[in-house]
Image (cartoon, rainbow, N blue to C red):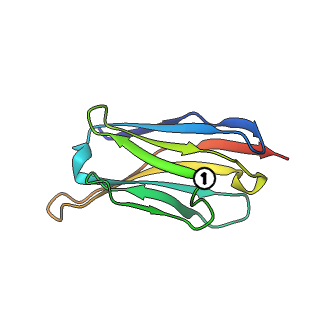
Amino acid sequence: QVQLVESGGGLMQAGGSLRLSCATSGITFSRYVMTWYRQAPGKQRELVASRTSAGITNYADSVKGRFAISRDNAKNTVYLQMNSLKPEDTAVYYCNAHSVVASIPGDYWGQGTQVTVSS
């Protein structure tokens, strides 16, 4: 059974930092691109950051220079370090695992963790 469990969300003042974690189980972690998405109230879900097992990263323009995605392949966990938080970062943050192996399709989501940034 595949599980993605996010943690680390909470309430933070603007300018502060949070680190989100997404612990996975039931997948061969190295075969998956790990991505953080977020969805604010009334808005569509958007990509925040992604990282392949080879270390290739991609960031939304709105978070470049403030957020950093990392992964620990030994712990099957992906992290999102969020610095210089802004009120517009308020959203539910979701972890996604997407297989890069055509013969092993898979696209999995966590339950989400709320991040609220106060001004």
The answer, for residue 56, to whether it is visible in the render is: yes
Residue 44 location, quadrant: bottom right
Q: Nearer the viewer, residue 115 or 107?
A: 115
Question: In the displayed image of the protein, which residue is found farthest to the left?
Answer: 103
Measuring 26% from the left and 44% from the top, which residue is drawn there? 29
Q: Position of residue 62 (x, y in %)?
A: 63, 64
Quadrant for the N terminus, please.
Answer: top left
Measuring 57% from the left and 61% from the top, which residue is drawn there? 64
Q: Is residue 57 above or below residue 1?
A: below
Question: In the displayed image of the protein, which residue is found farthest to the front?
Answer: 65
Measuring 56% from the left and 51% from the top, which residue is drawn there? 67
Q: Is residue 18 left or right of residue 69?
A: right
Q: Position of residue 7 (x, y in %)?
A: 54, 34
Q: Nearer the viewer, residue 110 or 73?
A: 73
Badge 1 amino acid: Arg
Q: Is residue 4 above or below residue 96?
A: above
The answer, for residue 111, to whether it is visible in the render is: no
- Local secondary structure at mark 1: loop
Q: Position of residue 24 (x, y in %)?
A: 35, 38
- Give the residue number, with chain letter if any, for mark 1: 66
Q: Is residue 30 left or right of residue 66?
A: left
Q: Is residue 111 left or right of residue 51?
A: right
Q: Position of residue 76 (x, y in %)?
A: 31, 36
Density class for disc 1 (Cα within 10 Å; few <14, some 14-19, many ≥20) is: few
Question: In the displayed image of the protein, which residue is found farthest to the right?
Answer: 119
Measuring 57% from the left and 64% from the top, which residue is drawn there? 46
